[in-house]
Amino acid sequence: MARERMTPRREDDTPRAPRTQENPVARVLALQRGAGNAAVAQLLRKDKTPQGDPPRAGGWNEAERDVAGTKRVPVDGITAGNQDPDVKKQSSEGAAGKAIVVVPNSVDVKAHPDVLLFFHGMGNLGYRERLTDDSSRGPAGSVHDVEADRMEQQLAHSGRNIVGVLPQGTSAATFGIADPQAYVTEVLAKAAAKLSVPAITSGRIIVSGHSGGGRPAVAAATKLTATAPTTDDEWFNQPPLFLFDGINGPNEANAIGDLMDKWLDADLVRLKASSDPVALLNRRAIRLRSTHTSSDLYTATNLGGNYDTEVSDGVDENKKPKTKTVTVKIAPERSLKGRIDGWFTKHKTELGPLAAQLRAQYDVPDQAVSGGHEATVGTGSLETDSKKRDAAPAGLTGASKTAGVPGYSGGGHLEESLSKLPPPPPPPKHAGLEAPERDEVPA
């Protein structure tokens, strides 16, 4: 587990049958229809960097799809984020300038919905359609957000007025987002245009990350909170941060610990200035939640402990790089929970009776969540029972249609974290998005 965080896990290298080549003119026209002129220009570039193929006709990323009570909207041509194609053999698609937007059918896009800005982990292709089976990430024809994260299913089931923005990064979980607010604004504008709905103006941004995506999530949260809040509303609207196995070593534990010190200092200032600090804390409900699986690495970064990892050890007699195993120790007081506990010990007298309520808003559970690392955003495991899978969205073909969509009736780790936020308002009126169509039952 520790080694995987340093270098993305290599996926199945089994050779696959060569793909049938489409007529080049037809391919460009199909790309223009499904992905826009920016993608066409990218395809026709004559440099030596592979740019990736356009989304497969009949595939997940060809066009918006109705998925589990949401609209799943692929967006491309984004200028504010990753521009590295990062072409991999496990998917024919490139990664440059892309994201997925998830809009639950019940969302009122005119009511400034919350936005979940979610950063995927290392090695999982992001939201590119898989060409090969992966026992922990999903079968050929699947996409990580639907299959392993069950992102669409959880956002719809949560009942919240919330939209998901899922940036497509590289397999090393790099995203190139210098200004998260500008990124969200650009992506939502492109999604609204595709859906022909009014402009979607974000309310509060909720930052989240899984595995290697924890690092850019913390960076985004740091950027979004660079200015200290001066009013109760500004304080409330600062982004919560949710991490899922998202602290990948002592350096990252130090970085998020420093951020927590800054956030808690700002909390103390605001609570001292408030005429009703209890009501203020009730309004916010949660600021941080970092959960972990039972792995040594994520237990250590969250709670303290030891884990083994591989580091470079020069070269062998054939001048090939070699590694050695070392044990990394993170003292409990230097883990995320330890850093937070230390701040509360230091400020115990100043906080008085507010300490317990504020401490509960920085949640680092002792108990590990169930299931495996790759599915820890979802329910902890992939759905392998065909009887518990729903029909594929209309328009999907091939392996994607055959596999269908994992069913969901609750129990997802993302939805559990979202439930810690203040209660959502009453369900808004239908926002004009079409109800999902149902295709035939998957084989």
Image (cartoon, helix red, strand yellow):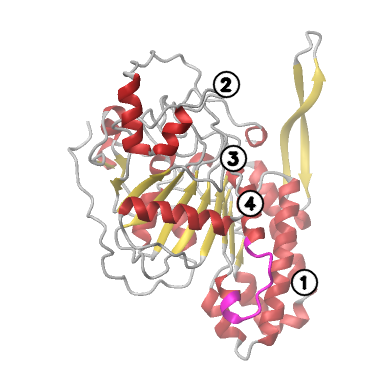
Q: Residues within 10 Å of mark 1 (few under 14, many from 20)?
A: few
Q: Of the residues shown, which amino acid type is indicated by label 1?
A: Thr
2 and 4 marks in contact (CB < 8 Å): no
Which element is circle 3 on? loop
Q: Of the residues shown, which amino acid type is indicated by label 2?
A: Lys
Q: Quadrant of the C terminus?
A: top left
Q: Quadrant of the N terminus?
A: top right
Q: In this rendering, would 150 be left or right of 373? A: left
Q: Of the residues shown, which amino acid type is indicated by label 4?
A: Ala
Q: In this rendering, would 210 be left or right of 257? A: left
- Of marks 1 and 4, which one's residue comes earlier in the chain? 4
Distance between the alpha carbons at the discs numbered 2 and 1: 57 Å
Residue holding disc 1: 345
* Residue at (30, 47) in percent of width and height: 67
Give coordinates of residue 128: x percent, y percent. Answer: 44, 35
Residue 48 numbered tag: 2
Which element is circle 4 on? loop
